[in-house]
Amino acid sequence: MTKIRNLFNNINMTEGNLFTRIILFALPLMFTTIVQLLYVTIDLTTVSIGDSADSMAAIASNSALINLIIFVFVGTSVGANVLISEARGANNPEKAEKIMHTSLVFSVIAGIFVGVVGFIFSDDLLKMMGTEEHYFSKAALYLKIYFVGLPFLMIYNYAAQILRGMGDSKSPLIALVISGAINVGFDSLFVFVFHMGVAGVAVATIISEIVSTAICIFILHKGKHNYVNFSYKKLRIDGKCLKEVLKIGLPAGLQGFFFSLPNVFIQASLYTIDPGNIALENGATAASNIEGYFNAGVDAISTAVMTFIAANVGAKKKENIKRIILFGFIWGTIYCGLLAAILALFHRPILQLFVRDEESIAAGYERLMIMGYPYFFDFTMALTASILRGMKRSTYPMVTTMLCCSALRIILIYTLFQVPEFHTIFWLYALFPLTWVLATSSNLVAIFIFIPKDLKKLDDKDINLEPALTK
């Protein structure tokens, strides 16, 4: 047991069997996402049983917007991961320490700002999404409470990325498992005992976010095997470090925004195909939840590759970087092949975990069939973007996502989708794989053009891989 546990502790990302170590690093990341999704599912189930179907729909109606926020927050925190990985690879603890403390101070400021703005404009955001009137008030209540807890979510994301940058992907998972168990307990207490409905679920979420944040900060402060340790006395913003973090993190955060923004419009467009068809909406929600689990592995492998590349940039190990890129594609092919087999063999029992009636199951499978089988292209899009970010070229994949996954999807929704022949479920969902292929192609062009040049720069004493479109 001790040997197995040690495999996941502070993984060396520049030496040894990198093929195995990438997946050892990725597995806790994947389980972290799965645990998060499980608690969302439990939230929905609890409020559905303990309150009403309207309450479940009210929480589900916030999913696209909340996912957008999470994508942005996780994206902006990527800068801390990349730079600490690079500093560790270069054996520069002084820089890693400055990046850690700067990032945590910034996370507090940004979390408070976004939380206040989101709380004020909650109703307007829900109206923009076309939220149904009969559960609008519940949806608004849930969203406002959610925004109150946003600073803790922001701090957790940065703390988790800092730990991952130091080679520790296990601790954020442990923090989430503990906080998630607390979340489930308070869900039951607030909904079944105090009959608080959506408000109870939202408050339970905030409590769990506080717990996960506290655990990660404690590990950063007291961890025996940390590359650098957190100190309250050193909490200050270093202007140069913040600039570096934002050069990578801000484009990655904007990429998350541009990736998720069309989902708000797609969710609103779904209501126009067959207004009032609850089975269609429930099937789409079920399939979307399942896709979230699918995406856990995609994000985990991509993040692992990004982190390993950044560490080897710091260590100036060019051959390792080439191997890591290849290993990422191999692991992604294996993973997406397994997903396709699971989808083909077990789609019905998986969908029945979320919906029971035949119409909803059929609606859910239609979405899974259109988006699930070509999921490899979603993986290649995520992986190629992570490769570029690991080499500190964060701007290019952001622009690619903005053009292919955001602008093009929205344009097609308001043009082609409005034509009666194309105003169907198939064409609405087909927007996803179409844009995945286009974004992957664009990122691959950037990799073939820029990465060889960046690898040559590793021979120089001063590494200066700017996140620019051209260099």
Image (cartoon, rainbow, N blue to C red):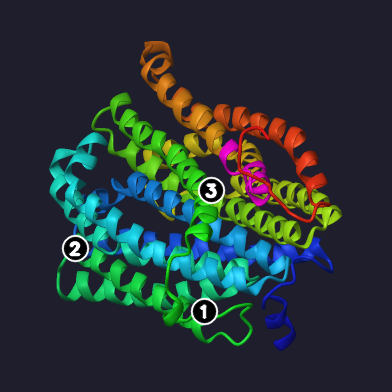
Whether residue 191 appears in magenta in the rendering, the answer is no
Q: Going by the image, does 48 lie left or right of 105? A: left
Q: Are marks 2 and 3 in contact (CB under 8 Å)?
A: no
* Residue denoted by label 2: 199
Identify which amino acid the numbered label 1 is placed on. Leu
Q: Secondary structure at mark 1?
A: helix
For image coordinates 43% across by 42% down, the residue present is 257
First in sequence: mark 1 or mark 2?
A: 2
**Label 1 – label 2 distance at C-alpha:** 32 Å
Residue 68 picture location, percent across and down: 39, 46
Nearer to us of marks 1 and 2 is 1
Q: Quadrant of residue 166?
A: bottom right
Instruction: Considering the whole magenta stretch, tell me its main secondary structure.
Output: helix
User: Quick check: 156 above or below 449?
Assistant: below
**Label 2 – label 3 distance at C-alpha:** 38 Å
Identify which amino acid the numbered label 2 is placed on. Ala
* Residue denoted by label 3: 247
Report whether residue 350 is seen.
no
Q: Residues within 10 Å of mark 1 (few under 14, many from 20)?
A: many
Identify which amino acid the numbered label 3 is placed on. Lys
For image coordinates 23% across by 50% down, the residue present is 117
Please provide the residue range marked out in magenta. 384-396
* Residue denoted by label 1: 220
Q: Going by the image, does 455 lie left or right of 419? A: right
Nearer to us of marks 3 and 1 is 3
